[in-house]
Image: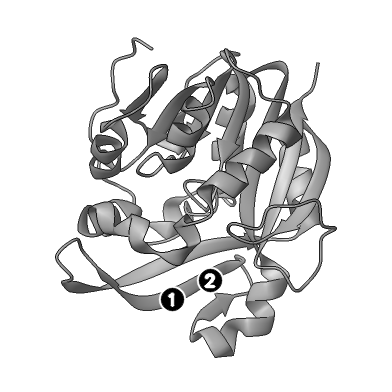
Amino acid sequence: MDRPEQPAQRDHWFEDLADHLGSAYLRYSFTKGTEQEVAFLVDELGLEPGMRVLDVGCGPGRHAHALGRRGIGVHGVDISERFVELARVDAPGGVTFERLDARRLSFDGEFDAAISLCQGAFGLSDGGAGRAARPPDPDAGVLDGIGRALRPGGRLALSAFSAYFQVRHTEVMGSTFDATRGVNHERTSIKDEAGADAEVDLWTTCFTPRELRLLAARSGLATDEIWSVRPGEYRREEPSIDSEEFLLIAHRAI
């Protein structure tokens, strides 16, 4: 895909975190279920070889690579230049990547499907410096851009942290939950490729199924299903208060 990349404006808290992590991101246990997740999504979204998929918040490209090995074309976007560089290494044919801010997507009906998984973009917009100047729901802009990127009828799979789960387990996880904004804040330590530690702040917006349906409708997306999922355990399970994430399955209204 021949597109000029966005200027490298660094105004997202996640970029410094990704710079430190680099390829060490792929050591975390939640990244180990890629093949299971992709197999589920291929079936759930009706993906076939030759289709084009937009991977929003692609990280180092694990889902994009797995889809590409199945003959599906993928264009992955991520705000982290470091992750984009890693994703381009050994990418299958038909799989491309660019540095792009998910809050400023400019695609227009170019894709058969889109994915945004593991809080790669959606759910990470309301945190860090400058929160007060942002819109009431910064993640709504991410969903708007995804909706525009899909052709009419195009399918979406998007994961989001569960507000129910987060509130129930805040004390156990050592985090704080802002009930006004629905944002969970955690101070934690992460290791780089050499094993060096860095203390970082994580801000993650959490959602209920109702909120996901309303946000989807606002972005011109009709909700097909919402499933309770866990990393590496994607399946058709009704929403519950006991699962860490929800998976929104939707399509661009015709």
Image coordinates of residue 48 in percent, x first then y, are: 65, 19
Quadrant holding the C terminus:
top right
Image coordinates of residue 116 in percent, x first then y, are: 55, 41
User: Secondary structure beneath disc 2?
Assistant: strand
Residue ID at (20%, 74%): 197
230 or 56, nearer to the observer: 230
Q: Which mark is residue 118?
A: none
Vertical side of 205 occupied by 60: above or below = above
Pointer 1 local density, CA inside 10 Å: few below 14, some 14–19, many at least 20: some
Residue corresponding to mark 2? 184
Image coordinates of residue 33 in percent, x first then y, are: 53, 54
**The image quarter in which residue 49 lies:** top right
Residue ID at (69%, 82%): 168
Residue corresponding to mark 1? 186
User: Secondary structure beneath disc 1?
Assistant: strand
Amino acid type of the residue that numbered disc 2 sits on in the rendered structure: Asn
- In this picture the colour scheme is one colour
**The image quarter in which residue 29 lies:** bottom left
Vertical side of 191 occupied by 130: above or below = above
Image coordinates of residue 44 in percent, x first then y, are: 75, 36
On screen, residue 205 versus residue 21, left or right, reads: right
Residue ID at (56%, 29%): 145
Amino acid type of the residue that numbered disc 1 sits on in the rendered structure: Glu
Can you see residue 45?
Answer: yes
Can you see residue 157?
Answer: no
Query: Label 1 near label 2: C-beta < 8 Å?
Result: yes
On screen, residue 50 versus residue 151, left or right, reads: left
Find the distance from the CA under tag 2 to the CA under tag 1: 7 Å
